[in-house]
Image: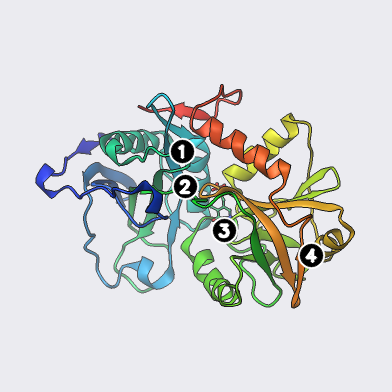
């Protein structure tokens, strides 16, 4: 397959947001996008084209049965002015796993990664410069066959859009209050919880809105069967520093295997932390808050990297985690991962890829 590139007419390029402090998340998109199509059993016509609307049949299967998967990655502008990706191969691998789960066609991760590099380089002026800000990359695959029979689509569109996003913590790295949902669940083992597929996010909205109205930033999800075991927080994986053990729930089908989760496990072990992947009940978490053995709680994900949790509300009772402030481990991991991503320090893991 040969990638074709059609550049946008300079007169039609969009003005870039001027103030990097107010970028927010997912509000601006660059001048180009990558698109390819799957038909007759193969990927074809890969191209970078000016950012534009899609024209789709209203019967396109994605609108009805939700065959849609995506990824979330970032391109960072390094201290040296270079452009870097963080473990991009892991996202390609995960997207292919999501595709398999949703009966969607797999793709050549290396080919897509190269197209992504070309896209990011073409729109490199959109990459913000402030530390903490980045160019967010959203690879997506949707089913576009116009047919209403419930079965996998015969055709698909794969696209990548990119856009500048701000530092997640414009006012500082402060802990959030979370709400334990013991009524609504996100995903069930045997379902599609481990795939980055649209349905999981649609299913999370109701509880998330409820939590927001009650003054909480995120929902802490419990397992769907017993509603006892902690799974994730919002759209992040979760870690608990209990005594001197860093605990995170194991990947057993209902939890998204985060790249940041995996990176935190590796780095934490290398700085001497005892990391265990095991089930942890909400009762153990509440008990840890009361007794003081629970020192830190934080979420992990590409958008925020590390998101400290200061308070957990369960059955109408609020419990402070430690002293309610951001802990030293969360701070250390956050600073270390950001320094790696912005290529400010040597990368002993081979995670950081220079692409321009
Ligand atoms: C994307 C995502 C994560 C975090 O994954 P990263 O690869 O670390 O960005 C965690 N949980 C859910 C539900 C997600 O969608």
Foreground tag (3 vs 2): 2
Question: In the visual, does 252 lie left or right of 256?
Answer: right
Mark toward the start of the polypeptide (1 vs 3): 1
Look at mark 1 in the image and give the residue it sits on: 131
Q: CA gap, disc 1 to disc 4?
A: 36 Å
Q: Position of residue 189 (x, y in %)?
A: 67, 62
- Are the residues tagged 2 and 4 within 8 Å (C-beta)? no
- Are the residues tagged 4 and 3 within 8 Å (C-beta)? no
Q: Report helix, strand or loop for mark 1.
A: loop
Look at mark 3 in the image and give the residue it sits on: 235
Look at mark 2 in the image and give the residue it sits on: 167
Question: Which residue does the image show at 57% across and 24% down from the upper left?
Answer: 347
Q: Report helix, strand or loop for mark 3.
A: loop
Q: Position of residue 126 (x, y in %)?
A: 30, 42
- Are the residues tagged 1 and 3 within 8 Å (C-beta)? no
Residue 148 found in image quarter = bottom left
Mark toward the start of the polypeptide (2 vs 4): 2
Mark toward the start of the polypeptide (1 vs 2): 1
Look at mark 4 in the image and give the residue it sits on: 282
Instruction: Bin the neighbour count of mark 1 within 10 Å (Cα to Cα): few under 14, some 14-19, many 20 and up.
Output: some
Mark toward the start of the polypeptide (1 vs 4): 1
Q: Position of residue 292 (x, y in %)?
A: 86, 56
- Are the residues tagged 3 and 2 within 8 Å (C-beta)? no
């Amino acid at each position: 397959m040969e990638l074709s590139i059609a550049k946008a007419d300079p007169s039609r390029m969009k003005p870039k947001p001027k103030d990097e402090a107010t970028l927010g998340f997912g509000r601006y998109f660059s001048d180009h996008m990558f698109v390819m199509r799957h038909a007759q059993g193969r990927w074809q016509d890969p191209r970078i084209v000016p950012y534009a609307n899609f024209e789709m049949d209203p019967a396109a299967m994605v609108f009805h049965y939700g065959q849609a998967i995506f990824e979330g990655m970032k391109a960072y502008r390094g201290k040296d002015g270079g452009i870097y990706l963080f473990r991009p191969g892991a996202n390609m691998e995960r997207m292919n796993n999501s595709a398999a789960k949703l009966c969607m066609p797999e793709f050549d991760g290396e080919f897509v990664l190269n197209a992504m590099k070309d896209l990011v380089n073409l729109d490199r002026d959109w990459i913000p410069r402030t530390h903490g800000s980045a160019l967010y990359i959203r690879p997506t695959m949707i089913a576009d066959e116009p047919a209403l029979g419930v079965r996998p689509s015969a055709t698909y569109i794969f696209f990548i859009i990119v856009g500048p996003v701000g530092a997640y913590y414009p006012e500082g790295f402060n802990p959030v209050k979370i709400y334990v949902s013991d009524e609504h669940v996100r995903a069930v083992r045997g379902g599609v919880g481990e795939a980055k597929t649209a349905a999981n996010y649609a299913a999370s909205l109701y509880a998330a809105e409820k939590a927001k109205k009650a003054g909480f930033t995120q929902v802490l999800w419990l397992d769907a069967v017993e509603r006892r075991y902690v799974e994730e927080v919002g759209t992040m994986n979760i870690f608990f520093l209990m005594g001197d053990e860093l605990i995170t729930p194991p990947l057993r089908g209902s939890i998204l295997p985060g790249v940041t989760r995996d990176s935190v496990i590796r780095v934490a072990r290398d700085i001497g932390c005892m990391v265990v992947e095991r089930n942890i009940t909400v009762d153990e978490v509440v008990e840890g808050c009361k007794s003081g053995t629970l020192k830190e709680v934080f979420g992990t994900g590409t958008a925020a990297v590390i998101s400290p949790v200061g308070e957990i509300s369960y059955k109408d009772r609020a419990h402070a985690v430690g002293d309610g402030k951001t802990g030293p481990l969360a701070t250390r991991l956050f600073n270390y991962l950001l320094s790696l991503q912005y290529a400010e320090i040597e990368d002993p893991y081979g995670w950081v890829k220079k692409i321009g």
